Image (cartoon, rainbow, N blue to C red):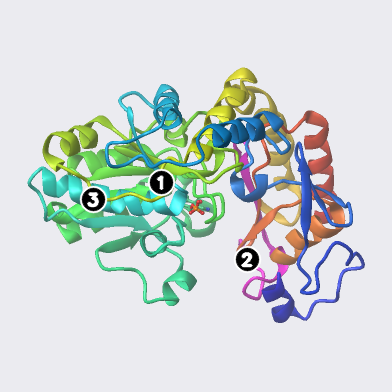
Amino acid sequence: WRHLDAAHHLHPFSDTKGLNAEGVRVITRAEGVYIFDSEGNRILDGMSGLWCSAVGHGRHAIVDAIADQLRQLDYYNTFFKTTHPGAAELAAAIAQVAPEGFERVFFTSGGSEAVDTVIRMVRHYWAAVGKPGKHIFIARKNAYHGSTIGGASLGGMAPMHAQGGLPIPGIVHVQQPYWWGEGGNMSPEEFGLFAAQEVARAIDEAGPENVAAFIGEPIQGAGGVIIPPSTYWPEVQKICRERDVLLVSDEVICGFGRTGEWFGCQHMGVQPDLITFAKGVTSGYFPLGGVIVGERVAEGLIEQGGEFHHGYTYSGHPGGCAAALATLKIMHEEDLVARVKCEIGPYLQERWLPLANHPLVGEARMVGLIGALELTPHKETRAKFPGEVGTVGLIARDISFREGLVMRAVRDSLILAPPFTLSEEEADDLIATVGRVLD
Ligand code: PMP
């Protein structure tokens, strides 16, 4: 926001309460789908924090589970022939909801570490099965896969690459399946196939014998909630299989129910070889992430890989495992994934998608509880707003500060990903707020 201020010489908002000396809002408390700032202003958390607060704020059962665990065992590592019951129990609980054949979990402290783990694990796998030449990763332009050197390199964000001399070698970025912004005159189906063919082209140019894996989010989250056309993922899967390239589904945002299925790849009908996760698995109550390893890679590593020299001090931290187990228990007990798929998801979508009729909205899209409004000053030409971060960022800020609803701006779109516990009344409020602000 400070960046926006500097760029646009904003007038201060009338409501400056709840901000610190630098103009940053201080959030002191949270309950249900709401956060509260230091002045007590109530703000609907339309982003689930940073896409993580899946089961909502103020869940004392999760807090108690963490405290109980830490009282019993504050820390011990899951390496060097030691583990603890929470880590084993959580791996089993994740395998229970993961796609078939995903039975092994490598824990990390978050999503970036999970993505870095994938790079090392996949290269180690190919070396172990006698194909050490397969080391190149195919990723997508404008993707976000984390802020570590590996994650930011697989990510396709130019401003991140500009800082720190990224990407690291061995990564090729291809067309993202962003039909509204980049589909030109093609139908969504044609564009989905076109974007998938760009994956094939990149693999063939590098030589399939040199390509280790393709990584993509089922729905690109931080890139702007880009929902690929239906033709995209099946074609990408086919292309990867034909060329013996592993498929990695980065489910740090899409995993654990966000799309209305336990994993976004299930929504897209795709069977990856590896799945990364973080965020929603603990609903944000404790840092934890990891990689769920499919049969093929697990077998290769176990049979031929020997020891994998990789791991983090906080891999499978007892507190994180307790938080995740308690979160999953709530998801099961309250049937929250089905709620996203069959109840509150469709309820919100029915009210969100018609916002496309507003003169400022070029496209409204949403799957489960992850959506975006693509704003444009001119629908027919799909024109962009002038300026780099300008107008839509300001609208997002206006909504969160003045109207009490957090949304995020990515380029010219407004992004939404509320907690799964959003009620119908809260959804009505949310839609009314967005409509009012657009008007
Ligand atoms: N992958 C994706 C798809 C993400 O959205 C994120 C975080 N926004 C990450 C990886 C990195 O996760 P973390 O911030 O937990 O390191």
Give the number of the mark in front: 2 or 3. 3
> Do callouts 2 and 3 mark residues in contact (Cβ within 8 Å)?
no
Amino acid on which the number 3 mark rests in the picture: His
Query: In the image, which disc is placed on residue 192?
Result: 1
Q: Sequence order check: which comes first, mark 2 or mark 3?
A: 3
In front of the other: 259 or 185: 259
Q: Which residue is mark 3?
A: 309
- Assess disc 2: are there few (<14), some (14-19) or many (≥20) residues with their C-alpha within 10 Å of its C-alpha: some
Residue 61: percent from the left, percent from the top? 67, 28
Q: Is residue 360 above or below residue 326?
A: below
Residue kind at label 1, given as amino acid type = Gly
Residue 347 appears in which quarter of the rendering? top right
Residue 237 can be seen in this image: yes
Tell me which residue sits at (46%, 70%) in the image: 160
Q: Quadrant of residue 101?
A: top left
Residue 368 at least partly seen: no
Spatial CA distance of label 2 from label 3 is 50 Å
The picture places residue 171, in percent across and down from the top left corner, at 29, 62
Q: Residues within 10 Å of mark 3 (few under 14, many from 20)?
A: few
How far apart marks 1 and 3 lie (CA) works out to 38 Å
